[in-house]
Image (cartoon, helix red, strand yellow):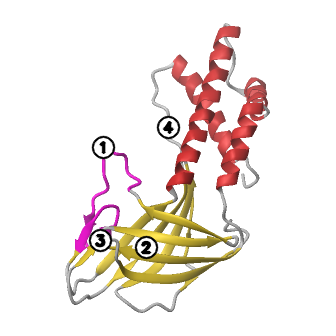
Amino acid sequence: MTEGWVWPLLGLVTVVILMFRSRSDSVAPSSESFGISLHGLHSDHKGIFEVNVVAIEFDELGLVFYVNGKYGCSHEPLDIDHVHVSAYISGAEEDFSSFDPAPADEPTEQRIGSLVNLTAPVVLGNCGNGMFRAPVVNHDRQERVLNAIDRLDSAARRMVEKLDSEFDGYSIEGESLENIENDFMNDFVVREIMDEINREFILDSGQLSMRVRFVNGEEQIIEEVPLTIQMKKEDV
């Protein structure tokens, strides 16, 4: 799975799902994202915001960081417009900014008990205490990954259409499925898409340095939290 197989296998899953759809009214299962929570981070920062955990996902949105932690007392209400993260990965700086991972018609609830989701502008009361969650993504990479996934889906559909047109009936089990898998994995377009997506996964083992900035509506940085994460090979 770690050597470029995850995304073409998702395409293969799409092939199988489409086959089942053409033969039944069953609802296709949704695909899972791939993520890891990294607790081994270090920060000497003392302020209103304290980062405790950074969760990392790589899915159809590309590389996503979920910055999680606690916030404490401030002397006045805090207007948080968005969160910006500068991550130094393999010697290069990557910029990530706030987004809402929920579907457009089901926006994330911003306050759940003492937890505040920083997915949209929010005001934190003075001398309040609670927890925060801030999803951030590189929007340029997100767009490229979404385009690649659309192409992967189209490749899967073309294969199903070809099978439907060339064969009166075909098995989606055993040796027949193995042949379908081999054909899909070795398709030139699919391998090209696989390479494109792999290039978007930019994490490497070693030290990951990040600066998390909480920004108000006037683009003023309210607070900046520097932190480092030691990425192990198995984490990557």
The residue range painted magenta reads 100-123
Identify the secondary structure beneath mark 2: strand
Name the quadrant of the C terminus.
bottom right
Front label number (4 vs 3): 3
Nearest to viewer (mark 3 / mark 2): 3
Query: Is residue 113 part of the magenta span, yes or no?
Result: yes
Residue 155 in sight here: yes
Q: Earlier in the sequence, mark 1 or mark 4?
A: 4
Mark pair 1, 4: CA separation:
20 Å
**Label 4 belongs to which residue?**
29
Q: Separation of disc 1 and disc 3 at Cα?
A: 28 Å
Taking the spot 31% from the left edge, 73% from the top edge, the residue there is 216
- Disc 4 element: loop
Q: Nearer the viewer, residue 119 or 29?
A: 119
Which residue is denoted by mark 2 in the rendering?
68
Secondary structure beneath label 3:
loop
